[in-house]
Each structure stands twice: as C-alpha cells, then as structure tokens.
Image (cartoon, rainbow, N blue to C red):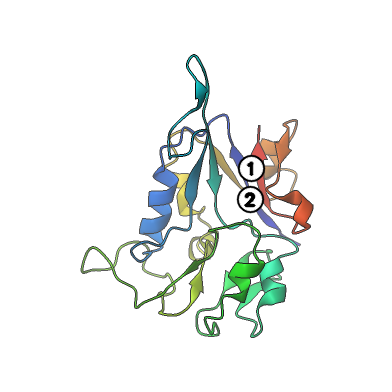
Amino acid sequence: MMRYAMAIDLKRCVGCHTCSVACKMANNLPNEIWWNRILTVGGEAMDTAAGTFPNNTLEYLPVNCQHCANPACVKACPVGATYKREEDGVVIQDYDQCIGCRYCMVACPYSGVRQFNWKQPEYHVDFAVGDANITPHQYNTVSKCTFCVHRLAEEKKPACMELCIGRARYFGDIDDPESEVSKAIRGRTYFHLLEEKGTKPNVYYLT
C-alpha cells in the first residue's frame, strides 16, 4: 500500500519562508491562516540567533501537518471529520462534516499545525488565488496541510516543494525504496517531531 511521506533537509533549509507562502497561495488560505510555518531554533524572536557573539547558533524548523500513521486527531474527532485515507495515508479534514469542536486541535501534539476559521474566510484581495480545484474554506471549521491532495490527484508534488530555493524537501511513497523520499533518507540521520507521543509521523527531518 502506498504511504506518502515528506523529508526535510535541515542543512539545506535557509528559513526563507517561500514554502509557507507557496502553500498559502496554492491553497487560497484565508488571512491569518498558515499551514506551513518556519520556526526559528535560536533566539526568542523569529530569525534571531541564540547565544552571545561570536558563539551564536541559529537553525530553522519547518512545521506542517505530520500526516501521522497513528494520528491522535482522528481518534479525537467525534464525527469522523478528520480521517486517514486508506489509499495513501494522508490525513484529511472534511469541512462539511466538521462541527468546529476543535477536539482534534487539542489532541494533536504539534502545536499550531491545525488552524481554526473563527470567522467567514477573508482575503486581502477580492479574488481567489491558487489552484482552481481546492476545497473552498468554511467558517467555524478546522483546516490543515493536506499534502496538496488536489495536486497529488494530478500527479504533481505539494506546492511547498516547487519554489524551495534550497531544494530542502523530498516527497513520495516511503514504502517504495526507489521513491524520492526513500532515497533522500537512505544513509542519513533523521528524527521525527515528538516521536515519544506514539503518533508515528510521516515527516522526516534530515540532520
């Protein structure tokens, strides 16, 4: 069975936030909603280093939905609005089924991955941007990264990968040894976020 996964090379990520913007545009995300975030591993503010000169450290950590093999959000949802697709393991949010209870947000150990639409979707421009076949966003629902399932249906890669200037992201079927993502992690050290939570994430961070 196919199981989609993503690998992110932390040595190649330069913290440019291009993946975040590409995701937001392609998925026509409402104002204040971000499915991809680039966290700064350093000082207290974004893009600031920790330590004292000349002994400073600064790294970046891209975070999106981890599309877990054992997703806590799916277990928490009382109406089946969040579920894992059997054909490829992608975790999906069904806006039509979502009742806005936000139990999935509480259950998910990855803070900020799931976003809640507190009001009718608003945009800085008066026309839709991004891909034509995305699911329209709705008020009072939870949304999250989908690995761009609308693009996968057209045999394209997720939008966050297309403009990455450092070529830091790899995607594909992790169960296929010849896939791009399998080749990327082969022989490399990597970690998963909050692996101790038992969610079995399908995002690999290469170090």
Give the residue at mark 2.
172
Q: Could you tell whether 184 is left or right of 120 in the image?
A: right
Q: Mark 1–mark 2 contact, CB under 8 Å? A: yes
Residue 145 position, x and y percent, is 52, 61
In the rendered structure, which disc, 1 or 2, sits on the residue that comes first in sequence? 2
Residue at the image position 42 percent from the left and 69 percent from the top: 134
Residue 139 position, x and y percent, is 40, 79
Residue at the image position 60 percent from the left and 80 percent from the top: 81
Please identify the quadrant where the C terminus is shown: top right
Give the residue at mark 1.
180
Q: Could you tell whether 162 is left or right of 108 in the image?
A: left
Instruction: Say above or below: 100 vs 151.
Output: below
Residue 173 visible in this rendered orientation of the protein: yes
In the foreground, 59 or 92 = 59
Quarter holding residue 126? bottom left
Instruction: Say above or below: 190 vs 203.
Output: above
* Residue most extreme to the top: 54
Residue 164 position, x and y percent, is 45, 40
Residue 93 position, x and y percent, is 56, 73
In the foreground, 36 or 163 = 36
